[in-house]
Amino acid sequence: MCSEQAVKVSADELNQSVVDQSKSDKSQVARTSINLQASWLEPLRGEFDQPYMQKLKAFLKAEKQRGAVLYPAGKEIFNALNTTPLDQVSVVILGQDPYHGPGQAHGLCFSVQPRVTAPPSLVNIFKELEQDLGVRNGEHGCLLSWAQQGVLLLNSVLTVERGRAGSHQGKGWERFTDRVVSVLNERCSNLVFMLWGSYAHKKGAVIDGNKHLVLKSTHPSPLSAHRGFLGCRHFSQANAFLSKVGKMPINWALPPLS
């Protein structure tokens, strides 16, 4: 892992993750501190000053004030970026929005918190992984060890209301994560992008296939997994490519829970 520490502000929601600090320059413009890992902060800082982000902050604040329960917890909204520094990314898996059930989401796409039952899409991911590499996961569905090895587990939308799938789509998160994908495409080379389903295909349209390996299949959802995801062999293809370009392959086997 990178030695840089996450630059954090105590926060439960995004509106508390970005806070005004003292005016310190001649223009007397208020600076901001952002709950974001240092390597991501420089290329993404400007997004937090954009009008769309201010509207998103206001939306989340209003949702909390009306009593809505939002997932993941505020301190975990940027968990994917804070766990996988920009300069350590090897593989990118794009999801859509967080799980909306209690105790599931923790800021890493497709992953659930320890001792939470794996949702159907994750079960199919594990099925494909076993067919592809013989790796048997199933004791738990926490993919933190993948993220710590350089697998960026990024949802397009970073928050959701309890029990309402897709409830925060169209509120601004997509623009922010589009910028994340652009930063990865522009600043990195020899990444593996796993794009599962038409939504991820569209979001990844900007990726330069001459610089990166782009792997596409259907979504691992039970509705579509048998139409192309199962049998796609993305995990072995990713490791073969990483080895070819001199990067460390991913150990896809999840460690046992302590």
Image (tube, helix red, strand yellow):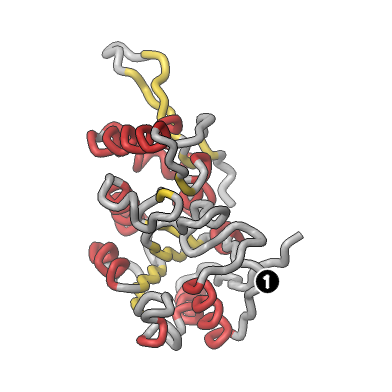
Corner quadrant of residue 189: bottom left
User: Looking at the image, which residue is at 38% across and 75% down?
Assistant: 219
Task: Classify 211 as above or below 225.
Answer: above
**Residue 162 in view:** yes
**Residue 183 in view:** no
User: Looking at the image, which residue is at 42% across and 44% down?
Assistant: 40
Mark 1 secondary-structure assignment: loop
Residue 220 horizontal side relative to residue 202, left or right: right
The residue closer to the viewer here, 3 or 32, is: 32
Residue neighbourhood size for the residue with mark 1, other residues' Cα within 10 Å, grouped as few (<14), some (14–19), many (≥20)? some
The residue closer to the viewer here, 126 or 120, is: 120
Residue 142 horizontal side relative to residue 256, left or right: left
In the rendered image, the residue lying farthest to the right is: 258
Residue 243: horizontal and vertical position, in percent?
A: 51, 75
- Image quadrant containing the C terminus: bottom right
User: Looking at the image, which residue is at 38% across and 33% down?
Assistant: 61
Task: Classify 23 as above or below 80.
Answer: above
Residue beneath disc 1: 139
Which amino acid, by three-letter code, is at mark 1? Glu
Residue 255: horizontal and vertical position, in percent?
A: 69, 66
Task: Classify 77 as above or below 166.
Answer: above
The residue closer to the viewer here, 123 or 155, is: 123
Residue 43: horizontal and vertical position, in percent?
A: 35, 42
Residue 10: horizontal and vertical position, in percent?
A: 53, 30
User: Looking at the image, which residue is at 49% across and 40% down?
Assistant: 74
**Total marks placed:** 1
